[in-house]
Image: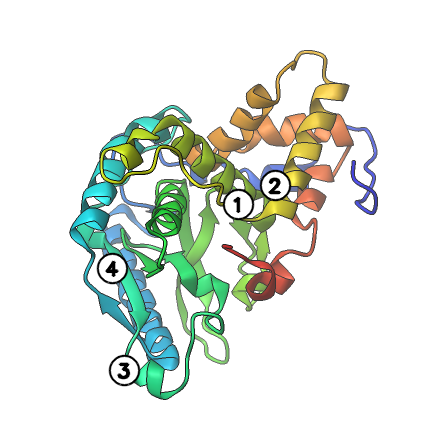
Amino acid sequence: MPEGEPKFNQDEITESTEEIISSKERVDGAKNMRPKVIDAPLEQQDFFLDELKGRTANIYKETLDKYGLVEVEKSETEAKIIQAILERVPEFVEKFGGNPSDIKVENIRFIDIGEEGEKKGITKEVIPPLLHAFYISGSESMVVLRDESIFKEMHRVIHELLHANSFQSFESREVPGTSLSQKGVRRMGFMTYDKKVKDWSLGASFLSINESITEELTLKFENQHVDLLTEHTEEKTWPQLYSYVGDRIRLQNIIEEIIEKNPAYKEKEEVFNIFAEAAMNGNLLKISRLIEKTFGKGSFREMGNMPEFSKKYLEVMSWD
């Protein structure tokens, strides 16, 4: 493994790992199924998810106001490419065992610096990278910052669409400073959240790996669908837009070591697909056992906090 990363003992899978991969979180069944609130009765699922959607919508509005951002209309070309992407994402997601979400063109919102933002002297250089594109948890909506490059916009759209189509579940969380509770994210893709940690960014495990998987899938999708560009622009290939470079290199190093220590696996693609399937269908059992077989007892949980990516989430994320 890369220098500076922890070494693991060779041993069996641990009970603490089993806690992370509890099968009760899995969502099986029909396509376009809404995310699951694991500690709410079936008849209350929609209520809690709608409450979560409303809460995140309020946070979204407050964030836009803070930076003087406003929603803007998509161009005809942007809308056509997004529609073509939406038509192809479900088949791509299903290849990795996921249940595609029912997302429409209007669910993908474009934002830009408005009049108030210009008065405040806001520029795109000072807008936190996290706000360049993000998926609104518990909804079918996502937000993309307007860019001069339509390719960068579409790259962000695809990346966030894959987040939205990944496995998701929610659970009760305490509201800091009160005796109240509200629904919060428990699983999103490969990520898990510790509800005992009040700060969301500090309570996320596998955040780095999850973003690496999502970005690798984004690049795969683009390579498979070059015609999305040729049909609507004069471009013949997708520009090389790379994000999370260091994190993706780290994931590739992990995959290479898995192959080196497990003769049953010969190709990087085969091992990567195990990571991708876990992110899309929510079943971490296969990949967790493979990691612990390769790196030793407790290594799966330890890998979730390697590196300290979540503690520097806002600073480390880069889309350029």
Disc 1 to disc 2: CB gap under 8 Å:
yes
Which circle marks residue 50 in the picture? 4
Q: Quadrant of residue 262?
A: top right
Total labels: the figure holds 4
Which kind of residue does numbered mark 4 sit on?
A: Asp
Identify the residue at horizontal 33%, vertical 46% (top origin). Answer: 35
Q: 101 or 243, which is in the foreground?
A: 243
Residue 196 seen in render:
no
Camera-side mark, 1 or 4: 1
Identify the residue at horizontal 67%, vertical 11% (top origin). Answer: 264
Gap between marks 1 and 2, in whole Å? 10 Å
Q: Quadrant of residue 222?
A: top left
What kind of colouring is applied to the model shown? rainbow
Q: Which residue is mark 2?
A: 248
Q: Position of residue 246 (x, y in %)?
A: 65, 47
Which kind of residue does numbered mark 2 sit on?
A: Arg
On screen, residue 15 versus residue 7, left or right, reads left
Which circle marks residue 115 in the picture? 3
Q: 165 or 182, which is in the foreground?
A: 165
Which circle marks residue 242 in the picture? 1
| Mark 1 / mark 4, whichever is N-terminal | 4
Camera-side mark, 4 or 2: 2
Q: Residues within 10 Å of mark 1 (few under 14, many from 20)?
A: some
Disc 1 to disc 4: CB gap under 8 Å:
no
Camera-side mark, 3 or 2: 3
